[in-house]
Image (spheres, grey):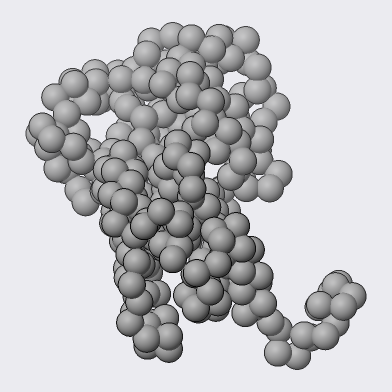
Amino acid sequence: MGIELVRIDDRLIHGQIVMAWCKAITIERIVVIDDEVALDSIRKMLFEAVAPPGIAVSILNVLQGIESLRTDAFAKEKLLILVTSPAAILTLVENGLVINKVNIGGMSFSKGKTVVTKAVSISATDKQAFKELHEQGLKLQIQQLPHDVPLDLMGKIN
Amino acid sequence: MVGVVIVAHGCFASALLTTAEQIAGKQEQVISLDFAIGENTADLQLRIKEAIRGVDTGQGAIILVDLLGGSPYHAAAIVTMQQPGIEMISGVNVSMLLEILPVRNDKLMNVASAALKGGHDGIRDLVFNEVTIVEGRD
């Protein structure tokens, strides 16, 4: 399986993904792994409708995501994996996802979160999950757009 | 009169309204919402709902968003599907907005058709105009 990018972005498939990332790198399938969206038929339909031409979309819950990784369901395709939280990445990594880098694109602010950059705010739960991912040797990079210089997340939250 | 809510990334929505008002004059029942980096799309949904309440006097409202598939699009689409009497169109441009501002006493459906037509009609290729429209262009 060719995983081109693993990204945390709570907007999931949106303007930056459609107009910037899918043009900057070769992507054949966007795999959204999120329990909430997998149950939300309206958002599912919207995400499927707005994918760039020629790029397939799969919207899976976490269990289905793990299963698709285990069975190499998308073995021949170049993938962009999208999730909304570091906890989701941690679950995938603990269940066999092999990656060395996580792109942190957008984690919107809400009450109780700490602002890290303009586009990234994290909760205590997020921080803990990031720490565990860091301890497992993953590079955690804040980078909204392909031409942005990646910023090391751990350097910003410690 | 049909209300209008413009939702877009950056400052486009407010600038678009300012631009249109420069040509069509000061408008009522029109609200622009700017979507900034870092804003929660759930919050944006709430702002859209509030704006709809602000512009809809019973004749319905039309939401104009910038980019197909962008966050304003998603937020507006969810609001549109949740409540009746709303139309939503993506790819807003100046000619689309100017086309509908004077015809808002018409039915919502007709205002939406005018928006679609106005948005398309404003896009022309200076040199290949006739070829593009009549035969398509290789």
Residue B73 screen position, x and y as percent: 47, 50
**The image quarter in which residue B128 lies:** bottom right
Residue A18 screen position, x and y as percent: 53, 49
Residue located at (14% from left, 24% from top): A124
Regarding residue B72, the answer to whether it shows in the image is yes
Residue located at (60% from left, 36% from top): A48
Residue located at (54% from left, 58% from top): B108
Q: Nearer the viewer, residue B22 or A74?
A: B22
Q: Is residue B49 left or right of residue A29?
A: left
Q: Is residue A100 left or right of residue A56?
A: left
Residue located at (44% from left, 39% from top): B83
Q: Nearer the viewer, residue A95 or B112?
A: B112
Residue A93 screen position, x and y as percent: 40, 16
**Which quarter of the image is occupied by the N terminus of chain A?**
top right
Question: B33 above or below A34?
Answer: below
Question: B21 above or below B96?
Answer: below
Q: Nearer the viewer, residue B25 or A158?
A: B25
